[in-house]
Amino acid sequence: MITIEPYLIAALKFIQSYPLLSTALPVWLIFAFLFFLRPIFSSLYGPLVRTYNYNTTQQQGFREITKGVFRLFTTFFLTSFMFAFTGSLGLLLSNLQHHNISISDVKEVIVSTGHLLLSDGRQLDINQYIVKPIQNYFTLFGMAGIISVAAARILAVMYNTYSIANILNIAVTTSACLSVVAVFQVHLLTILTDTVKLAFYDGPFTLFKLSLYGFLACESILHIMPRKFRKARLTPFFLQRQRHEIFELQEQFFSRPFLLEKWVETARSEISKHGLEEINWISFSFTREQVECIIEATKAYELKKNGTDTNTSRIMKRAVRLITSEDYYNSYMQTNGDRDPNKLFTTLFSKHIDQSTFTTINGRFVFVTLPCPHERIRYLNQLEFIHQSSNVAFLSLEPERVYYYSNRFSYQWNNETRFHCCENFNGLFDKYITDKSQARLLISLLGILASIRVPFDRNTIVSTLASIDGNKGQAQGTAQSILEELIDTLAQNGICWFTSDNRDQIMGTHLIGPVTDLCLQKMLLNGSDSCMITTQ
Amino acid sequence: MKSARKEAPSTFIEQRRFIRVGDGLFYISILASLTLMITLTRPALQNYRCPHFYLLDTLTYLIDPLLLNAISLLLLAYSVYMCFAHKKDLKQFQRYIWSIAIPGIVVLLAYFLGDELLKHVFVHERPPVEHQLGEPWLTRLVVPHERVGLTSCPSGFVFRQLFILLTCLLLCNQNPSTLVRSRRMDSFITILNQSYARIKSRLQGKEPTHIRPHQRFDTICTTLKLDYEHTAKIAFVNWCIILSQIFIFLFILFSRFYRGAHSLSDIGISLGSATYLFWIFVSILLWKKQVDRRFVPDMEYVSLVYLPLFYFYSMSAVVWICTAFVIISGLSLMYIYPSQFEDAK
């Protein structure tokens, strides 16, 4: 067994011999720690607002819930442990100081007799100096940590914001930094460990128990809380989507404009124009609930149209069974056999609903999506090309979604900038914008720009947004010019975007066509190796 | 594009280059091990001893953990072979080599980590001699006496067995028949149904009737172009292997505690440390292969929870500080710089 202690002590002695270095070291360590753990902490506190996946079947929901419970519970336990340990450390130091003992005077903790051996040979009763106060306060500090996480989660769900979670993030990071400083004072930490052990050997179990109670209490409060107080959506464990929501979806399917075919045509013509050889169109999947809706909707549609029920619904059921099977979907990713789900899908669905499609072109990806983000994300995670793609961007109309998705794709990019950008622009909603959907689209684009580190003049955008207020006619023109500029910038940086459903509501149909064409064209012309994903 | 297409394997199963980890296995194993570790290391449980019975004394003496380790390794080797069976680019002898190499690597790694590293870090005394029933026959013959006297935490047998069990669970998930975990139960039910129907028809002296396979399982077989009978058999064998491995693991765990070789805290720490280190290695492997990086941030959360606990349970602050520094820095670098490595590649 190699002992590293002598080397560590030698290194510490070397550092101590240079005062400047030894003073600066903790500062650098804190910076390094913050730098390393900042994205991790923000990913950890992200689930405080949304943890569970709603638009899934029970089985998929179970996976999501396992993940959600794991992350939330870990957050509770980690925070309580960190608070308790840092609190005990402070307590230990203050107690010693109170008795006029410096930490450097303490040579050793004699665990067997329960004494502190000082460097001058004196022995002090550890019970009197440290154990009793720590015994009382270790649990209290842990509880403080748990209460802070629970409060942050409840407030974050109530106000649907990440700012509260972020405040907690700062608090925990600070206490973690203190712990790091303590960690590098090996002597201090050894004393702390021994004394905490003497005082509170059952510490982890107690904190674990408290975390469990805290977690359950927090979730119970959130679920009992009347819906009007919750701004973020929260679905109880294992509950399927409510029936009335399915009917709402059904309505949506009927009322949606069918523009996909136009998109497909445009894309095909553009691709053939630029001499690309191959294009695979693959249909995307629905959630089980949506599938039920589609079947119901189609049946009703057929009945309405022909007066008789055709065998469409039977075929559709078969198609749906195939398409919803993720194995089939994945296998189709690599095989291009006779059983082309796209053909089947297009034949069956394209006339009735706005289907979701993506294509791969020489390693470049265009993505057009359905309004079922969770399902989509789940599939995206399974697709290897997403993992291989060096440049993936996400667009969302709702700022919190960007953060939610970027959590899921956190291994792909550092999502901090985007998140903050969206947060910063959030206030503009109420101040300047009357047409919220338009503003949201702009914000999403800005979010992307920020995420790919493209410099943009924020003042110009703010003033332009301000000018939109109250002038609808002018607003359309201005928005279009801003969008075109933004798209241009995006395309130059290898990012292209599509909008999906509700586009006519967002921008007006007259605008969407040119924008879609423009971005496709830009992307193809630039030959960018990028993937663009848009959401509702 | 065309050349890339030619190189691409013809089916989804063949093109899966490396292992995939199911969310359930990862999260549930971590949560379970964390809960068990924290619960079993309670001071209140440290003096608890099992009441002894003659039958159990004999059973735990005869069924030696070392023997069970060997059986479990054979099962693991079979799992590896089955896992590589659908990889067309591997030759037969290569499959045999992998089937021997992977269990070997796993057991050596577990031995090195558990016995050579962690036992020196967690300096916990063995339970008192009067509570010990002595080592079983094979362990007594094979393991040198001085090694028996080594510190008791973490339990080497439990540590190794958990490593093997997790590897087996991971590999069984790679099999095409169990591509989607939830479907395994379907296949199992299908097999049971078929077996029952066959036995029934034989007893009644009738021709065996065609049993309609389970709908979802059938869909998978059709869509993945797999032979139904063969796939169902593999799924069934997988189930049996998993159940056997779990049984072996539980028996070893019980045997070590029952014979007084380890206290409950030793076993708890074995469970926690083995699970944690196993996933650390898996996340490094997955990251290196650039297939699945999603476990890197999750491993960092897990580390932030596990490492302070290990530090708390062990007597060696320095070792855990350095380990924590290395692991957290390593994982953070893996998290922050994936694309750079990818580009370089």
Image (spheres, rainbow, N blue to C red):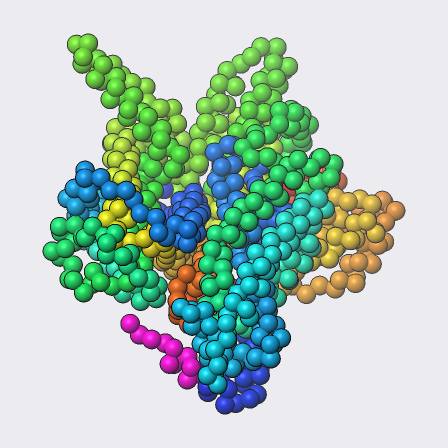
Q: Position of residue A425 (x, y in %)?
A: 74, 55
Vertically, is A374 above or below A169? above
Classify residue A442 as left or right of residue A527.
Answer: right
Compare residues B304 and B207 and report the one nearer the observer: B304
Q: In this view, does B87 lie above or below B340?
A: above
Looking at the image, which residue is at 67% across and 27% down? Answer: A248
Q: In which quadrant is the C terminus of chain B drawn?
A: bottom left
Instruction: Depth check: give the residue in front, B99 or A214.
Output: A214
Q: Can residue B335 be seen in this view?
A: no
Within the magenta stretch, is there residue A437? no
Figure check: A347 above or below B3: above
Q: Give the range drawn in magenta.
A: A1-11
Q: Where, by quadrant of the figure, is residue B174 drawn?
A: top left
Which of A180/A375 is in front? A180
x and y percentages locating residue A294 in the rendered image:
57, 25
Q: Which residue is drawn at 52% across and 48% down?
A: A209
Of residue A205 and residue A457, the one placed in the foreground of this image is A205
Furthest-left residue in this view: B141
Q: Is residue B235 above or below residue A443?
A: above
Residue at position x 35%, y 31% from top? B185
Counting from the top left corner in percent of width and height, residue A471 is at: 87, 47
Q: Is residue A8 magenta?
A: yes
Q: Position of residue A124 (x, y in %)?
A: 50, 75
The reply, left or right, for residue A469 in relation to residue B86 is right
Residue at position x 29%, y 51% in the image: B158
**What type of secondary structure mainly makes up the magenta span?**
helix
Residue A381 appears in the figure: yes
Asked if residue A428 lies left or right of residue A377, the reply is: right
